[in-house]
Amino acid sequence: MPLHPLVVHAVVVLGPLAALTGLAYAAVPRWRWLLRWPLVALALVTGVAAVLATQSGESLLESRPELEPLVEEHEEHGELMRNVALGYVLVSALAAWALGGASALASGRGARETRFGVPVAVLLGLSAVGLLVMLFLAGDSGARAVWG
């Protein structure tokens, strides 16, 4: 069994979760204390899974070169999706650092705001939407390649 179909499912499941977590983190400041580390972890795992999916897809194509005409569009979308996912890791880390919000502590300790709050929140939201779009495009082109 090729590794590519297995790794792709990690991206398909975790990618939208990472993007939706990013949208919530950007839009709801009072949830930031709760979503900060899940956002970073989901983005990181999605980025690693996207890299593995791209590498395993290239290996699959090397072993089955007759598939190249069928998967050309999917390959392009997959590589772009990998780059967007890696960029999302960086934006998520920046957002986790730059965006403050309420603290889980009753004292409020740990709550902070930076002057970068609004631009970083907008950047995170746009990155999350970009990740969702690329997930759709790569997944749709892969499904069309496999199922016709």
Image: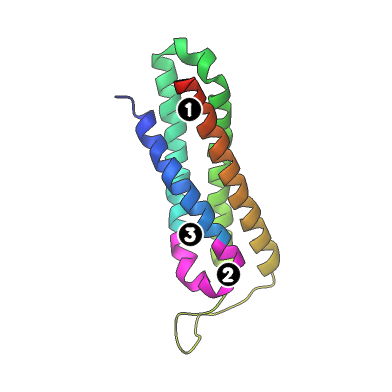
Res 34 visible:
yes
Spot the residue most to the front.
148
Q: Nearer the viewer, mark 1 or mark 2?
A: 1
State which quadrant residue 92 falls in.
Answer: bottom right
Answer whether residue 28 is magenta in the image.
yes
Tell me if mark 2 has few (under 14), some (14-19) or many (20+) residues whose alpha carbon lies within 10 angstroms of its own.
Answer: few
| Residue type, mark 2 in image | Val
76 or 30, which lies in front? 30
Q: Are marks 1 and 2 in contact (CB under 8 Å)?
A: no
Residue drawn at 48 percent across, 90 percent down: 107
Residue bearing the label numbered 1? 143
- For the record, the magenta segment spans 24-38
Percent from the top left, x then y, of residue 7? 38, 36
Query: In the drawing, what numbered circle is on residue 39?
Result: 3
Give left or right: position of 17 versus 92: left
Res 78 visible:
no
Q: Nearer the viewer, mark 3 or mark 2?
A: 2
Percent from the top left, x then y, of residue 102? 54, 79
| Residue type, mark 1 in image | Ala
Residue drawn at 44 percent across, 18 percent down: 61
Does 105 appear above or below 15? below
109 or 31, which lies in front? 31
Earlier residue among tags 3 and 2: 2
